[in-house]
Image (tube, helix red, strand yellow):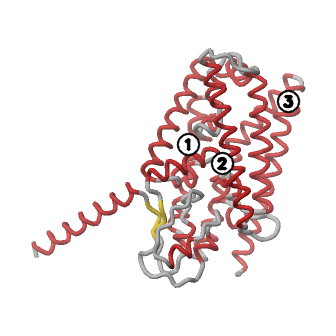
Amino acid sequence: MNTDRVIERRALKSILWVYIVLCFVIAGLNYGYAPHATPKVAAFITWFWHFYENWIKTFFILTAGILTLRIIGKTKRSTLRRRNLIGFFLTAMVVHILLPLITGIQELYFFTMPLPWTTTPFQLMSESSGFYLSRFPLWGLAGISAALLFYIIVSIIVFVGTLLFGRRLQCSTLCLFNGFAAEVFDPAMPLIGKARKCSPQMLTVLAVVRRVFFGVAILFSLWWNAYLTGVPTPGNPQRIGNVETYLYLIGELMMAMLFWMVFIGRGYCYYCPLGTLLALIGKVAGQQIVTDNTKCVECGSCNAACPMTIDLKTAAIKRESSRNSRCVGCGHCVDACPTKTLTYTTTFLTWAQTRKNKSKAVRKQTEQGTK
């Protein structure tokens, strides 16, 4: 490994450590200390939290992403991974910088993950929820309406986009929770030790965890839907909202960061509730990794590159497409293949490529006919 790459990886690891430490400190201040602090101190903590989540986070995404581009550009083909990073750059600039400046709403990133990942939109529609009570004085009815409209637009883009492009759109281009970190900090993960693949036993455990988290997310969604429509429900909005906040902080945010430190960047993606739903939609979309473009040389580069422990090598040897529900469409395997035998595609992408090829053939024939 040359000196430049060593320095760049160390810089990337340092940025990731700073990002993780700040997340813990600021989250602790915002959720733990601010509710009991004086109004002036609480207001400053809230302001700094928003500044961190938008401006500093975007700075980290851009800086770390550029370092990662330099690192992967020196080691392997990186067509799809470059597209991932460019997608996250643009998403961060729009969601964390541009739209907050236009709307004055500093927490729009809460609304970039569609159901069933969070019930924040439902909470914002309930005048009894803690989320509504804390945001209404700041945003007003117009701000709440704008946030909900933004959420609807994002949901339509994600679900329609997944039907066309598979999980790649959300999980490897738009996700500002775990997807962005898994891509922009990839060469730095894990921070401690070496990256590890899941054993078959661990995959079984994570499959169970995925079903549990998906089930819990669906139950929360059903509870809020019932409450908003007047159906008698146990519990109260503020308590349910608090339970969801603790689940987010412990089961999602803290666990995601723990995976970054000791496992792999995509650790949380194994059981993300939204990812579970998008995997089902991806099946309808015909999402797959085609493995027979050329000939597999059985080098194992695809398996080594895959962050979701998918056995692409075996599929490629058999010249069978891989349709694994864990696939997030990151394209690491496609870029890593030395013989270019792999392709990420969906029914729509295959159709579009076929039309493109036909158009090229017709244009070529026309040009030859005019000579």
The picture places residue 5, in percent across and down from the top left corner, at 69, 75
How far apart, in angstroms, are the residues tagged by discs 1 and 3? 28 Å
Residue 176, disc: none
Callout in the foreground (3, 2): 2
Q: State the mark number for residue 272.
A: 2
Say which residue label 1 marks. Answer: 94
Q: Give 117 or 320, whichever is nearer the viewer.
A: 320
User: Which residue in the protein does label 3 denote?
Assistant: 34
* Quadrant into which the C terminus falls: bottom left
List x then y, in percent, for residue 338. 52, 80
Residue type at mark 3?
Answer: Ala
- Relative to 167, does residue 317 appear above or below in the rendering? below
State the separation of the CA atoms marked 3 and 2.
Answer: 29 Å
Residue displayed at 19% across by 67% down: 363
Farthest bottom residue in view:
297
Q: Hey, what amino acid is under mark 2?
A: Cys
| Mark 2 residue element | loop
Is any atom of residue 85 visible in this view?
no
Q: CA distance from mark 1 to mark 2?
A: 24 Å
